[in-house]
Image (cartoon, helix red, strand yellow):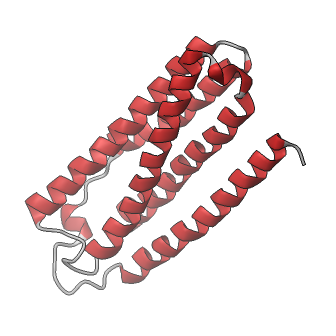
Amino acid sequence: MNEAWRGRVGMIGLIIVESSLFAVFVVAYLAYLGKSLNGPYPQDVLELPIFNTVCLLSSSITIALAVRALRRGMLRRAGLWFLVTTVLGAVFLVGTAREWWRLIVGHGLTIGTNLFGTPFYSLVGLHASHVTVGLVILTLLCVFAFSGALARHVERAEIASWYWHFVDCVWVVVFTVVYVIGR
């Protein structure tokens, strides 16, 4: 098995395992939905994070453009697209932090407040931790693209982009479960 296939199989395995982990957290969120005896309740405190969602989902387009530019040998352009992707992911993460600040300080909702807070922070926090890992990967891809070192590792960059697409797909599920169904 050549190196490219090992990388692809490894990333597919990681995505399967991480999907299973997220599935457990989604089921837990749904199981506890509506079981809180005291507030605050989701419908009272959650706002739809539309701007953050647009930023994160747009980043799937920009990372695809980065990989495409990399495949064409346009390292500087790839670096710029990786940078845009990183900024969009960072904006999403800052939006998540602002939401948590508003919920904790403004509404007194913490992980230990009630049966809504515990799975909410666990699920959204799990996703945020994956975004953080993705931002580290994206920053490295950006640096390596601008340094020229990524020219020999296009396949690895593409496989790394799969992780970012996975993070975006997970957000669609989290958004739907928490902010649409859960409200």
Picture coordinates of residue 160 (x, y %)? Answer: 63, 40
Picture coordinates of residue 28 (x, y %)? Answer: 44, 78
Which sits in the foreground, 44 or 132?
132
Whether residue 144 appears in this view of the structure is yes
Badge count:
0
Q: Residue at x 11, y 67 (%)?
A: 108
Q: Residue at x 65, y 58 (%)?
A: 14
Displayed quadrant of residue 46: bottom left
Q: Is residue 16 left or right of residue 133?
A: right
Picture coordinates of residue 67 (x, y %)? Answer: 65, 27
Up-down relation of residue 101 to residue 164 (above or below): below
Up-down relation of residue 40 to residue 130 (above or below): below
Which sits in the foreground, 155 or 43?
155
Q: Is residue 135 left or right of residue 73?
A: left
Displayed quadrant of residue 79: top right
Which sits in the foreground, 29 or 16?
16
Extreme residue in the right direction: 1
Q: Residue at x 52, y 32 (%)?
A: 140
Q: Is residue 23 left or right of residue 47?
A: right
Up-down relation of residue 41 to residue 107 (above or below): below
Q: Residue at x 80, y 49 (%)?
A: 6
Quarter of the C terminus within the rendering: bottom left
Displayed quadrant of residue 145: top right
Whether residue 182 appears in this view of the structure is no
Picture coordinates of residue 177 (x, y %)? Answer: 44, 65
Up-down relation of residue 75 to residue 135 (above or below): above
